[in-house]
Image (spheres, rainbow, N blue to C red):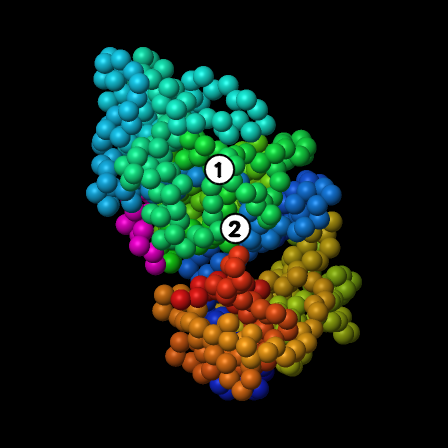
Amino acid sequence: MNTNSLVTSRVIRRNAAGVAFSLLLISLCPAATPDVQTLIDTWNKDKPGGVAVAWVDEQGVQFFQTGRFAKGDDRPVTPDTQFEIGSVTKVFTALLLAESERAGKVNRDDPVTKYLQVPTNPEGLARLEKITLLMLATHTSGLPRLLPGFLPADMRDPYADFTQEKLLAALATSAGSVKPPADYAYSNYGAAVLGQVLAAAWGQSYAEALRQHVLDPLGLSQTTLGLRGAAALADLAPGHDDKGTSVPNWTWDAVAPAGGIRSSARQMALFLQACLGLRETPLAASFAATAQPMRPLVGLVGSIGLAWHLTADDPPVIWHNGGTGGCRSFVGFDPRGKRGVVVLVNIAQSPDGLAMGLLRGNKNTPAPAATGAASPANLEDYVGRYPLAPTFVMSVTTDQGRLFLQATGQSQLLLVPAGIDRFKVKDVEAEVSFERDAAGKVVALVLHQNGMDQRAKRGEVALLVEITLPVEQLQGYVGDYALTPAVLLNVTVQDGGLAVQVTGQSRLPVFASAKDKFFYKAVDAQIAFQRDASGLVTGLVLHQGGRDFVAEKK
């Protein structure tokens, strides 16, 4: 066999029109990404809830999830499960500051008192006049972490009854002791004040200003504030304290700008793509403004931008975490490497170490068992089927002390030992490595080829069966879907079925396996359409080579 791609050579023989399509999609796959699934499965072991992760890079988005809503609630966590993101809300509030400044509504050096009428004496007012919006956004205002007089009516929902009137009264109380500017000191109080200042500048509530000037322009229709009295979300993951006991979700009033947002891995992936400039939005300049270092973290390592924290690495990791009574969150990205990660969990245990390890490329998975991979005695360890896609399986077999690999529709190839659990593919420019779990059992295969790593878990996969959908239903999928700014998937109805054309390539049919789910026969890929709460199709996810690529409907 020649050195054509192991994965695409079958397509070359079966359908010449599908070659460019397959190569384009495979070229969208990044180089190796961490083994996120193994890491989060391990992290979540024996916990009552679940984890949702979005990994973002220049080639698209991958979603990983594990666990369930709670003990007694076996709904699985998905990319669309809603979580409380806690203090990650602060970066949205900072983005609203940057947008408000860009629109000429505020200046970051404006004093708080320009927008809020605080009931205090002239001396206190003079002190508050020294607190600027920039100080609030960088935690250098001198305001304490929590609000004066913070005595919640219900400690299980501590911010629910903290109204605008109480916030202004707290500012009046603080006026006698505050001494801005100050060294960095993290303040939920200051973030709440910043959000209410911006709301006043727009003449709107914070919720209205956030929706109109940040969430809607970013296309985050399913990202909301958990305001007091709002209808409960059916897909909101229930919280658990650090011992795993169920606790109520939090609700918010005036302190919402510090921690009130609820969102999902899918929505936060869109946010991260905008942070990295991988998705065009009208907020690009404001994103850039928030990520610039503004103040040193006195007594700590790194600096702070507008709410974002920046590590001392070169390049820095830009990040923020969050927590409520029963959830934890982390959002971070490497702007130079064009990659980022979102980790959402519904238990009060921090995933920060896990998330930072992913961004920095730390190898936290167990080391492979030190067995002699070339020894015929243990070749049986690798024997099995490794599906890379529902219609594309790599089968590993042994014969007379040698190991062989055969991909769907292709010739059997000899695997030549190249190290512990690693083999070269004879006559093809590719290698295969095997992954083991903590017990030493082989659980996955990784195909290394053309600078890419494609992982396939060991096991069987259900075959896709074609069904027929009414043409009226198919019409709902018709439209253009943006895979990248330069690559569209154009979906049309053709000969009573759907067909998809990638920019500059041939149109290929796709076949329904269920409502909103389609598969190709010419290439090893599948499409799942997404809908909003009203049932309208809003996007699709292209599955290929073990990766998920999200495309929004234009």
Circle 2 Cα neighbour tier, 10 Å, few/some/many (<14 / 14–19 / ≥20): many
Picture quarter containing residue 112? Answer: top left
- Coordinates of residue 381 in the picture (x, y in percent): 75, 61
Instruction: Give left or right: position of 239 versus 334.
Output: right
Label 2 sits on residue: 265
Side (left or right) of 318 relative to 232 = left
Q: Amino acid at mark 2?
A: Ala
Residue 282 colored magenta?
yes
What is the secondary structure assignment of the residue under circle 1? loop
Asked which secondary structure carries label 2, the reply is: helix
The image shows residue 237, relative to residue 8, as above or below, that is above
Looking at the image, residue 475 lies above or below residue 420? below
Q: Could you tell which of marks 1 and 2 lies nearer the N-terminus?
A: 1
Distance between the Cα atoms at labels 1 and 2? 20 Å
Please tell me the numbered disc located at residue 227: 1
Nearer the observer, 79 or 295: 79
Residue drawn at (69%, 58%) of the image: 443
**In the image shown, does 157 or 525 lie closer to the viewer?**
157
Q: Mark 1 is on which residue type?
A: Leu
Mark yes or no: residue 105 visible: yes
Q: Residue 394: within the magenta?
A: no
In the rendered structure, which segment of residues is drawn in magenta?
Answer: 280-292
